[in-house]
Image (tube, helix red, strand yellow):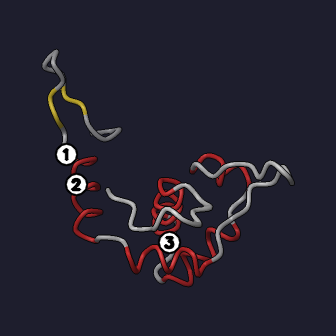
Amino acid sequence: MPDPRGRKGRVYPFDALVCAVAAGVLSGAKSLAAIGEWITDAPTWALRALGFTLDPLTGQVPAPHPATIRRLLERLDGDAMDRAIGAFNRPSRSSAGEWTGAPGS
């Protein structure tokens, strides 16, 4: 899935932001505000697991501001995200003939 942000000023990894949005939705968030609040309130271990990095000066894992999430989602290509989720959920055959795909499929 392409990153819609410009190269200048990227603070947070794109994958971490998208994973955090997905985690917020999977946790029950039903609005942009709720997704942003979930991410803001997420514990450090969860932010690290989602791909956010330590700030080298403070040693903390800063959570993105809800406005950062909103701006990303406004620019994100919904069709590309739909295709990425569909590809993740679609089982495929490995070269050995075994089914692979999403965990538990």
Q: Is residue 56 above or below residue 62?
A: above
Q: Answer left or right for 91 relative to 40.
A: left
- Dot 2: within a 10 Å radius of its alpha carbon, few (fewer than 14), some, or many (20 or more) residues? few
Amino acid bearing label 2: Gly
Instruction: Give the mark nearest the N terminus, 3 or 1.
Output: 3
Residue drawn 27% across the image and 54% down it:
84
Q: Position of residue 8 (x, y in %)?
A: 54, 65
- Dot 3: within a 10 Å radius of its alpha carbon, few (fewer than 14), some, or many (20 or more) residues? few
Q: Answer left or right for 100 relative to 73.
A: left
Quarter that holds the N terminus: bottom left
Q: Answer left or right for 92 relative to 10.
A: left
Q: Which residue is mark 3?
A: 28
Q: Position of residue 92 (x, y in %)?
A: 16, 35
Determine whether label 2 and label 3 are within 8 Å by CB.
Answer: no
Q: Answer left or right for 63 relative to 60.
A: left
Residue drawn 77% across the image and 52% down it:
55
Quarter that holds the C terminus: top left
Instruction: Give the mark nearest the N terminus, 2 or 3.
Output: 3
Q: Secondary structure at mark 3?
A: loop
Badge number at residue 90: 1
Q: Secondary structure at mark 1?
A: loop
The one of 71 and 91 positioned closer to us in this rendering: 71
Determine whether label 1 and label 2 are within 8 Å by CB.
Answer: yes
Q: Quadrant of residue 83?
A: bottom left
Amino acid bearing label 1: Arg
- Nearest-to-viewer mark from 2 and 3: 2
Q: Position of residue 71 (x, y in %)?
A: 49, 79
- Dot 1: within a 10 Å radius of its alpha carbon, few (fewer than 14), some, or many (20 or more) residues? few
Q: Secondary structure at mark 2?
A: helix
Q: Which residue is mark 2?
A: 86
Residue drawn 33% across the image and 38% down it:
104
